[in-house]
Image: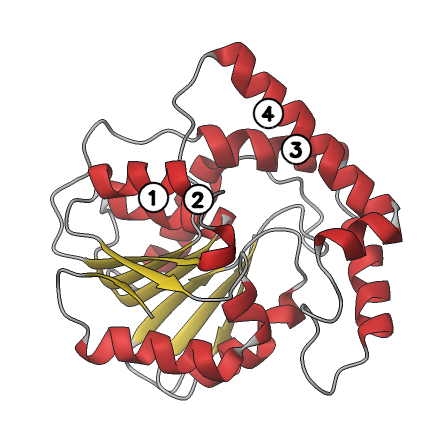
Amino acid sequence: MRVLEYGKEHEKTLLFLPCTAEPKWVFADSVGLLSRDYHVMQIVYDGHGETGEDFISVETTVAEVTDWLQQHGITNLDAAYGCSLGGACLTRLLALDEIPVGQAIIDGGITPYQMPYLLRRLHLAVDVLSFKLAANNRKVLEAAFPPERFTLPGHDSVKEYDAIAAYLKTYSDRTIRNIFWSGNNYALPETPAACSTKIAYWYGADEKKDRKYNIRFIRRYFPQIQLCEFPNMAHAELVMIHPEEFYRRIMEFLTHAPKDQSEKS
């Protein structure tokens, strides 16, 4: 695991846990905007292109993040953001409450399956196959993530998709299996530690069907959570493709969001 730090001159801290299957530069604009106000710590997971180690599990990642923070004298966080797999890591971090977090946004976060083992293994096989197809077939990759939708304005979609395709090929078979198994089956305490964190769960309207179970689980697990649906947004689209809107929305939440709401934005 690596930690990239930005805005170290600021006292306020923000932990940034990205989604999987995307290189760190995809989040550069959003992280850069956040670093105007926060000391941002962006996690680069093991197995994700540059650490030399395979990804092991959500549990291992959260333990390593916790250790890194404590070793660097950070015993609490002002804010945290986690998307998809990062949302799974953030969910566990909040549930354990070993590092108290003032405010947290779980963006399209994955929650643990509640289904028989054989069904979970079947889902794993489908997920692994889908990932490998996208990693090794440009048409499949572009069908899943249309370049006209998932390329920042002014960027060269051909060059970016060339880079992403090459990046996905760096994932080992073990890392791919562990991402999808642990991301959907990580352990949580039966009830989360009592915490005063203000938490929001974000999701795009275009992923609402896929997030149906996650939303139901997270509302039950964190009763204080706010739900926020973003029209015309797909999974992780806001943070990757609309950095200015992402920054505006996250700062609204961090500065004056109400404590209990469910809304469409």
Q: Gap between marks 4 and 2, in whole Å?
A: 15 Å
Q: Earlier in the sequence, mark 1 or mark 3?
A: 3
Picture coordinates of residue 9, whole percent (x, y)? 38, 87
Residue 173 in view, yes or no: yes
Viewer-nearest of discs 1 and 3:
1
Which amino acid type is marked by label 1?
A: Ile
Picture coordinates of residue 33, whole percent (x, y)? 47, 84
Q: Which disc number belongs to residue 154? A: none
Check if mark 1's residue and mark 4's residue have beta carbons within 8 Å: no
Q: Which disc number belongs to residue 123? A: 4
Residue at x-position 14% and y-position 70%? 258
Q: Which disc number belongs to residue 127? A: 3
Residue 57 left/right relative to 115: right
Q: Which disc number belongs to residue 215? A: 1
Q: Within 10 Å of the Cα at label 1, are there few (<14), some (14-19), or many (20+) other Cα atoms? A: many
Check if mark 2's residue and mark 3's residue have beta carbons within 8 Å: no
Q: Within 10 Å of the Cα at label 3, are there few (<14), some (14-19), or many (20+) other Cα atoms? A: some
Residue at x-position 81% and y-position 40%? 133
In front of the other: 48 or 127 = 127
Check if mark 1's residue and mark 2's residue have beta carbons within 8 Å: yes
Which amino acid type is marked by label 2?
A: Arg
Which residue is labeled 2 in the image?
211
Residue 64 left/right relative to 1: left
